[in-house]
Amino acid sequence: MMSSVEILKVEGGESWFTEEEEGLVSKSWNLMKKDAGEWGLKFFLKIFEIAPSAQKMFSFLRESNVALEQNAKLKAHAKSVFVMTCEAAVELRRSGEVVIRESSLKKLGGVHLKYGVVDEHFEVTKYALLETIKEAVGEMWTPEMKRAWSVAYHHLVAAIKTHMK
Amino acid sequence: MMSSVEILKVEGGESWFTEEEEGLVSKSWNLMKKDAGEWGLKFFLKIFEIAPSAQKMFSFLRESNVALEQNAKLKAHAKSVFVMTCEAAVELRRSGEVVIRESSLKKLGGVHLKYGVVDEHFEVTKYALLETIKEAVGEMWTPEMKRAWSVAYHHLVAAIKTHMK
């Protein structure tokens, strides 16, 4: 894991994730986490609204005829990814690196590589994440909060990408 | 051009684009066309917001350091694509086929093939188009109007794809 941390720190220098950014990310996560399942599902439904063909990447969607909103496996997966993303973002500054709970960056990198995830997928996912958080936090949303989540997401993706080789 | 028309008609049968759908598309286009330049630019900015890497496909963006909003070539291109898309949608029923002004489906197919456009790009573009029209028409927006534009867009893309081989 050292290599990705190293790369992230060099890339961002001293200000790779500021205290203000951490505050904005924490504040919004505190508001969303009690309904993480709901927002996680909305996050994935947004991804599939923008890019329906991304559904093909998930075996539990390929093998199912249930509507997306009713798919228990999608719900579980979406919640877990959303919680993992948000918690890693919140922990970014305190830990000084990307920390993933119940998984590892190496495993995540391998999975994303295996399923053919490319830059464009990370981009659409970023857009869907920001749209979801914007809807979730309502009037709390500001350009600064958008930027804070963008920076956090950038670091998470960079960490995954270092393990996609 | 006959082959694509044929395919579209077989695909959609009698109801490939209904009178109601035509009405909704025309009504919204009438509202937008006087500001087609503005909405066309918003359409492309939305595409690049969702998928920044798509900028690499446009030579006049690769070679420029000007902000997207200020790029005269992007503005001209965006307006022309937006007008072409909307006019083709409006004409779909009356002409019984996809009619493109000042260009040809064959040329459009060739260009999209040359620059490596894949399904995912058409998907993101569809989302960006619908979001742009939604913003442009305001309270006129309904699920039926969204569906009408989705059907029209589907036929335009199908026609382009038949020339992408």
Image: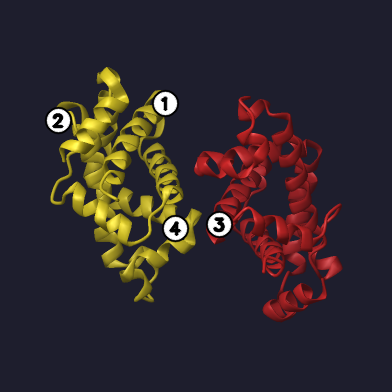
Chain colours: A yellow, B red
Residue at which label 1 appears: A142
Q: Residue at x 72, y 74 (%)?
A: B8
Q: Residues within 10 Å of mark 4 (few under 14, many from 20)?
A: some
Mark in the foreground, 1 or 2: 2
- Tags 4 and 1 touching, CB below 8 Å: no
Asked whether A42 or B82 is in front, the reply is B82
Dot 2: element: helix
Q: Residues within 10 Å of mark 1 (few under 14, many from 20)?
A: few
Mark in the foreground, 1 or 3: 3
Q: What label does residue A48 carry, if any?
A: 4
Is the residue at mark 3 from the same chain as the one at mark 4? Answer: no
Please state the horizontal and vertical placement of residue B13, each as a whole percent of the image.
71, 80
Please state the horizontal and vertical placement of residue B58, each as a whole percent of the image.
64, 42
Q: Is residue B31 left or right of residue A13?
A: right
- Tags 3 and 2 touching, CB below 8 Å: no
N-term mark: 4 or 1? 4
Above or below, A8 relative to B109: above
Q: Residues within 10 Å of mark 3 (few under 14, many from 20)?
A: some
Residue at which label 2 appears: A95
Q: Tell me which chain the residue with mark 1 is part of.
A: A
Q: Which amino acid does label 2 sit on?
A: Ser
